Image (tube, rainbow, N blue to C red):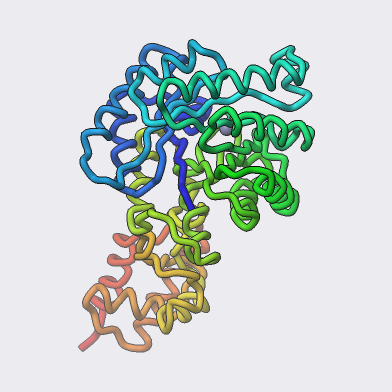
């Protein structure tokens, strides 16, 4: 299964996000280390700065001598100017797209089906003539008439495309519908099929996984699920699900997931919510007494995978839901040996702070323990 990362292109289209050239290079290098198969470095026609970033990313990744380095890709609309600028950036592949749905044909492109088909074929032929790998996307594919979508894909395959991609541009698919659509497209083509799922209804990862079930060989993802509007399929969630729930291998080094997520969070300024799966702060945090007791006896009771496997650490949080086992464990970690009644008193104080809405930080907990144990008689 190929992982095509578009953090630096669709991810950077997140409203309010704009990365400098050196920030983009830093992220590209981290993605390469993480093991993604392709990095969509940007959309060079957008601006001179964007074109320069794509050139610099292509140059810096090409310097890496490893045979398994990521393919560097640039986005281009289906016209010769976009394609030339993209190819001249020194990338390995071009991601060429044109919208195919009735809504986009009529209101955005003002083109007939025949015009769209002709333009797609010409673009792919031209990009191929420039000696790069070509991936073709039918923008808004999931709202396109199925027979027309297949006609376009077959025509670009004939024109030399190396892969086709099915974008769910406004995230309207369900897993069942995605599985059907992808299996139809896969059965009509010889080249690999990819998907690009947006998260407008929160289904991007589920739809990407359904596409894999139907034979897709690649998915577009972004770190922290960044992207237009509600974002794209999250790299962390998709890859971890593939690995742990489907038994499908990728080249991703899962232990680096948190580190890359943190880097992208820092450079984009878009915070990962605490309850974000896999790499959110709370993904392996436990507070309630029953859960803490469980994980202290056996982590599998309330954790579906080991936190270290995805670069995370287990956290026991103290608050009003805290039970005796958590307090005993935390006191022991501070190097104290507390008596039964002392544990009870520490727990009572922790719950009291929790009830008053006060966060029991490590510092505050240390103070509580010192007060209770320090006040021992004899
Ligand atoms: O969502 C989309 O359709 C896109 C295209 C450029 C592939 O990002
Ligand atoms: Zn997109």
* Residue at the image point whose x is 68% and y is 49% from the top: 187
> Horizontal and vertical percent for residue 181?
72, 46
Total tally of numbered discs in the picture: 0
On screen, 217 above or below 63? below
> Horizontal and vertical percent for residue 2?
46, 48
Q: Quadrant of residue 360?
A: bottom left
- Name of the residue lying farthest toward the front: 158
On screen, 189 above or below 123? below
* Residue at the image point whose x is 31% and y is 23% from the top: 21
Relative horizontal placement of residue 193, taking residue 184 as reference (left or right): left
Relative horizontal placement of residue 378, taking residue 317 as reference (left or right): left
Camera-side residue of 11 and 4: 4
> Horizontal and vertical percent for residue 235?
47, 48
Camera-side residue of 18 and 232: 232
Relative horizontal placement of residue 332, taking residue 279 as reference (left or right): left
**Ligand 1, what quadrant?**
top right
> Horizontal and vertical percent for residue 49?
36, 15
Asked whether residue 20 is in view, the answer is no
Q: Quadrant of residue 327?
A: bottom left
Q: Quadrant of residue 192?
A: top right
* Residue at the image point whose x is 46% and y is 29% from the top: 9
Relative horizontal placement of residue 154, taking residue 102 as reference (left or right): left
Camera-side residue of 86 and 159: 159
* Residue at the image point whose x is 39% and y is 46% from the top: 36
């Amino acid at each position: 299964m190929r992982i095509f990362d578009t953090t630096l292109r669709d991810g950077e289209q997140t409203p309010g996000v704009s990365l400098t050239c050196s920030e983009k290079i830093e992220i590209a290098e981290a993605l390469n280390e993480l093991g993604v198969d392709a990095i969509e470095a940007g959309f060079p026609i957008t601006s001179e700065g964007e074109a320069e970033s794509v050139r610099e990313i292509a140059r810096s990744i090409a310097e890496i001598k490893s045979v398994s380095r990521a393919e560097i890709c640039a986005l281009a609309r289906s016209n010769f100017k976009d394609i030339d600028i993209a190819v001249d950036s020194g990338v390995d592949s071009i991601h060429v797209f044109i919208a195919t749905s009735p809504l986009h044909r009529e209101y955005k492109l003002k083109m007939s089906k025949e015009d769209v088909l002709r333009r797609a074929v010409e673009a792919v032929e031209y990009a191929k003539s420039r000696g790069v790998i070509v991936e073709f996307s039918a923008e808004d594919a999931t709202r396109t008439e199925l027979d027309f979508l297949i006609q376009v894909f077959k025509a670009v395959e004939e024109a030399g495309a190396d892969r086709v991609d099915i974008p769910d541009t406004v995230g309207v698919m369900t897993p069942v519908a995605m599985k059907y659509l992808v299996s139809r497209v896969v059965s009509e083509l010889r080249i690999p099929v990819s998907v690009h799922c947006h998260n407008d209804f929160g289904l991007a990862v589920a739809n990407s996984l359904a596409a894999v079930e139907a034979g897709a060989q690649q998915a577009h993802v972004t770190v922290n699920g960044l992207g237009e509007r509600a974002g794209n399929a999250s790299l962390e969630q998709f890859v971890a699900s593939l690995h742990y729930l489907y038994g499908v291998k990728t080249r991703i080094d899962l232990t680096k997931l948190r580190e890359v997520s943190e880097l992208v969070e820092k450079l984009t300024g878009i915070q990962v919510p605490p309850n974000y799966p896999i790499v959110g702060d709370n993904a392996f945090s436990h507070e309630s007494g029953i859960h803490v007791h469980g994980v202290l006896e056996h982590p599998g009771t309330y954790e579906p995978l080991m936190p270290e496997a995805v670069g995370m650490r287990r956290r026991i949080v103290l608050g009003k839901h805290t039970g005796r086992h958590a307090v005993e464990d935390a006191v022991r970690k501070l190097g104290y040996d507390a008596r039964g009644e002392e544990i009870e008193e520490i727990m009572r104080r922790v719950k009291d702070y929790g009830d008053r809405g006060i966060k029991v930080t490590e510092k505050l907990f240390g103070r509580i323990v010192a007060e209770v144990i320090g006040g021992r008689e004899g």
